[in-house]
Amino acid sequence: MTELDVSRFYERLGKIHSHFKQHRSSAWGGATCLSLNGTGNEDENPYLKSVVLYHYLFGYELPDTILILTESGMCYILSTKRKCEFLNSAVGKAPPGGSILGVTLLQKNKNDGNEENFSKLMKEIQLDQGDDNSKVGVIMKEVSKGKGDTNGKGKKNLVSSWEDILQKDKVEMVDVAPGISLVMSLKDELEIDMMRKSSVLSNKVLKHGFVPRIEEVIDNEMSVTHEQIASEVDGMIEDPSKINLKVPKEHVESCYFPILQSGGTYDLKLNAQSSDETVKYDIIIVSLGARYQMYCSNISRTFLVDPPKAISDTYDILLGMQNACIEAMVPQRRLSTVYYAAIDYLKSSGNGGLVKSLPKNLGFSMGLDFRDSALVLSPKNQVMIRSGMLFNLSVGFSGVALSDSDKSSVGNKSAVKSVKTYALQVADMVVVTSKSAEVLTKHAKALTDISYVIGGDSDESSDEGGNASHDDAAYAKSLANQEDKYPSGKRASARLAKNNTGAQDTQEGASERERRQVELMSRKNEERIRELARANAKNKGADKESDLAEELITYNRARDYPDYVMPNQVKVDMKNECVILPIFGNPIPFHISTIKNVVLPDPDLATYLRINFYTAGSTIGKDTPVNMGKLILKHAPYASFIRELTFRSLDSHNLTQAFRQISELRKRVRQREIREQEEANLVKQEKLVRTKNERVPRLSDLTLRPVFSGRKTQGNIEAHTNGLRFISTRGEIVDVMYSNIKHAIYQPCENEIMVLIHFHLRNPIMLGKKRQKDIQVFTEVVDASLQVDAGRRSMYDPDEMDDEQRERQLRKKLNQAFKEFCRKVESTAKKNGYSLEFDIPYRDLGFNGTPHNQMVFVQPTLNCLVNVTDTPFFVTDLSEVDHVHFERVTFMSKTFDVVLINKDFSKQPWRVDMIPNSDKDAIQDWLTDMELSYTEGPMNLNWKQIMLTCAGDDRFYMNTEEDEITQKEAGWEFLRMFGRDNNSDDDDDEDDDAYSEEAEADGGGESEADSDSNSEESEFDSESEDESDFDADQDLEEQGMDWEDMEKAAMADDRRRKQSGRDEEEDARLKAKRGNGSQSRGSSKRTSSGSGRRVEKRRRR
């Protein structure tokens, strides 16, 4: 049997105990202690409260087990020997300071019929409450079941015997199922993650399983029963590989047999059944539920075939009502408000008649239990909604009448004609967050996504009239009527739906992304404002200490000068790191940090040595010592600086030696400063504690990257108590502590030549003489330098087939070995109190791009965007990304660039260039799912300047200026391709156009002089338009003419040539004449056009 998760057991048992103590008189029936007995068997009923509770606590079903939880916090468990061995790891492991004091195990004793064990339990119950008025909390619905249970040999089981003892001693038993429901309704992060996966599974089965199948049935007019399709869907849930989902079969199961209904007979209750009648093409309601690792989810959708307008309108009302219910699902409201929100929406929208068609409740809480009866969305439930609750929100109408007038718009052959009453239902999984509710089942439910049009009008007019023209007119009229009935947004048929699904999904996905991005940008701005406020409060005063400059001191007094100092010679003191220069016969020391560079020109009659110093006003480059830069800023306002000194000597020996020593000393000091900067942020690691007296997980024959001192480093890696150790064949050792691993990545060998394990560290470590933040070990499956034979080989060559087979086997073997090692490392780390999980890159979300100097395959993981196959590594932690900007997004470009902006504005953004346009939508979908905001732009930006500007703006994430009144774009909104200025520009253009039209209309009543001046202006305008052909060509390059326009222009040109009767020679001669004339009038023409533009501007104003 697998191990018990001790920490999770105590955490969840502590939640139950704390809630029991706080709400004992209400939700727990006034019980003085709890007897939570495992009475059920999962095979009989998987949703028994005891079965669900034991899965919640232990992760497994433990039937015939007694669990006593006292008010003081002691837990007693009576069970069989094997179950006690499983629970033994929890004994003595109670967390200090918790509400649970400890766990005591009692082993089942057949010899005395458990009398001794029962007496101990009764003693603890009476001792805990202190009087005879004992109330024991039990799951009341399961007590009656326990009375008659036997162990298969005619004897009562353990739980039944214990219940007999309680009744014999006249102990009052109260129902505590509501209290258990309230505790289990608040999901932790692990449970919410499981519910998300379960919801995704239900969504995928509906999208990739049921929808294609029902479309196939409708399109081919197949005769299939509801039960047959439901059975196929159930098989897809039990085996997700049927819809290409790589989910282990043992982790999933169906919550219930899927429900499929059509033909006018509908039942929206959970106990409805799929009948053996044939599916009708009218209103089809499907409900299915998947269970992933014991966590349940449910989804329902209604599909409309040839829907009349009345049904379509009612469905739109249903979606609006569901949105109103979701908006009402916020913390600190009662569950009944959700039901009343639906009623209020129907009444306010003028559809109060549909209130009677509502079901008795609009959903229920879900989790390990499929339906919690204590947390139903009914009008009488007064339980408070809290963050972390998960519900199946199921809205619908049943028994809605459909009159003959409503059905008059559909064809006589449509199955809707026979429907008298109908029902609609939509159910989704909803999680309540701290601010709002989030829908987990994302399957499309808009009217255009669930509507199918396959029927046409009757052929009544086909027999009337004997001429073909009448038939054609009638057919055209029927097509027009059909187009009027069914707008282009609906599917014309199932076959057409299949062809248009991709385009519709793309369009709706883009609009949904845009909506979510607007909300996400606003929320991110608020979060960043709070983060920066906390960071500023935390680091207040720390920057001042780091900005202090350290004064340079060479000698404290003149007597400390070296003995070899001469009055008129340049000397270098390597020990004190200074240069002693003669100034007016006095030796003056200058610290080596003050010297910018030194120049020794080619000697002529004399030798010259020029020394340049760092001064105020000069550029402080990256080679400038950090402390020297601070000193310049400190003394620049009031101090005088020496820019340069030049020394001349007839003897070249002294100056040449000084030049060589100064250069050497500057090099040493610079290297030391670089080394200090690299080691400044290094965090001292704890020493590796090697595992003893136990087998150590090990991987052999690995290659380490980066390498030691430029040589290929091979060796083995081992997992010890607090970290991993790589030992090379040359004895070199690299230790990586578990606490220093920020992200661990395991990449199997699929299309690559290697299988690898990559560690992205929190703090860099020294590898050789360089600090490294990424450490990787790998094994090559195929030698990277393997040269393929240039000669042709047959596809049936047995040697080549054997090589491929060996390579496949080697890939599989290495993948399994690395995967097993990762599992053992996770287990070792967890056993020693460290949290370490290996991520696997999502290959299906990967894309090609250039993060450095070459095109590589970039893949996202759960927390990063990585390429760890090629060097240099590209690992971007998504938690450090503030915003993502897409550059070069135009219709003409085949590729675009992605810029990932760091939250630390002092660091330059990460870039991935040359990404194909076909990957843009997938990347944007992924970013939206990861809750990262993004924008698009047509050009590359100067990010160095942008980051400097943003870092200096204290109100960057706020939407107002410093006066807190003037509006501005908050955060990264200014990067949007279509900003606020476009609307105003468009308005200005429209105003100009309207004004020019009014001016032209008023021009009819002007005087002759005005007409003459206008005609002159129009001549100037026409001439200016002739001269502005170059600008027009540029506009055409951006806008362009389509093929139809170019064909029309060519045909018009041919007609003009034919009518004029000119041949090509005459055209050439006329063009030559026109060209000579234009040359002589060119200067005056340009002048006229310029004045014409000025006149036109003044007239419009």
Image (cartoon, helix red, strand yellow):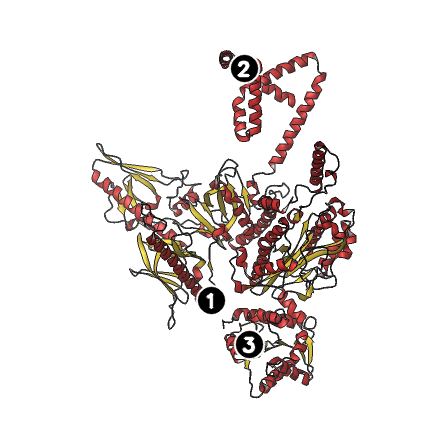
For discs 1 and 3, the disc positioned in front in the rendered view: 1
Residue 127 appears in view = no
Q: Residues within 10 Å of mark 2 (few under 14, many from 20)?
A: some
Quarter of the image with the C terminus is: top right
Name which of mark 2 and mark 1 comes first in the sequence.
Answer: 1
Name the image quarter holding residue 53. Answer: bottom right
**Which sits in the foreground, 436 or 604?**
436
The residue at which mark 1 appears reads as 830
**Residue highlighted by disc 2:** 1085
- Tag 1 secondary structure: helix
Image location of residue 869, percent across then percent down:
40, 51
Q: Amino acid at mark 2?
A: Lys
- Percent coordinates x, y for residue 98 in the rendering: 56, 71
Amino acid type, label 1: Lys
Numbered mark located on residue 102 in the image: 3
Asked if marks 2 and 1 touch (Cβ < 8 Å), the reply is no
- Please give the name of the residue rendered at 72% of the width and 50% of the height, measured from the top-left corner: 416
Tell me which amino acid carries mark 3. Answer: Gly
Of labels 3 and 2, earlier in sequence is: 3
- Up-down relation of residue 718 to residue 852 (above or below): below
